[in-house]
Amino acid sequence: MTNTDFTAFRNRVFEYVERAVVYGDVVNVTTKHGNAVLISEEDYKNMVETLNLASAPGMVESVKSAAAEPLEDCILYD
């Protein structure tokens, strides 16, 4: 995570956006009124999808159950 104040962010906005988009960095921008976080659109969409899946009834339990299964029990052989 990169931390910066708003003045530095404003002066180097392209660099910070590139860090988020190209390198997957999270940029924390501090202001006197609070902080803002910059992430790539891809990371944002992935986070929203994860939250949506986790909110589906029974989904978390289903994933935990599947993760506990031995891998060899999950592979189909011809």
Image (tube, rainbow, N blue to C red):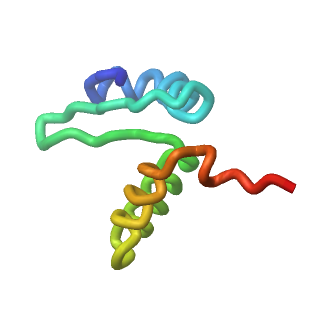
- Which residue is pictured at 52% across the width and 42% down the height? 40
Q: Which of the 4 image quarters holds residue 29?
A: top left
Task: Establish if 44 lies above or below 40.
Answer: below
Q: Position of residue 51 (x, y in %)?
A: 38, 62
Furthest-right residue in this view: 78
- Using residue 39 as the reference point, say whether residue 3 is left or right of it: left
- Using residue 51 as the reference point, say whether residue 44 is left or right of it: right
Q: Position of residue 45 (x, y in %)?
A: 52, 56
Q: Position of residue 78 (x, y in %)?
A: 87, 56
Task: Establish if 58 lies above or below 7.
Answer: below
- Which residue is pictured at 38% across the width and 30% down the height? 27
How many numbered circles does the render carry? Answer: 0
Q: Nearer the viewer, residue 61 or 48?
A: 61
Task: Establish if 75 lies above or below 13.
Answer: below
Q: Position of residue 6 (x, y in %)?
A: 29, 30
- Which residue is pictured at 52% across the width and 25% down the height? 19
Task: Establish if 26 lies above or below 2.
Answer: below
Q: Nearer the viewer, residue 11 or 30?
A: 30
Q: Nearer the viewer, residue 77 or 47?
A: 77
Instruction: Name the quadrant of the N terminus.
Output: top left
Q: Which of the 4 image quarters holds residue 9?
A: top left
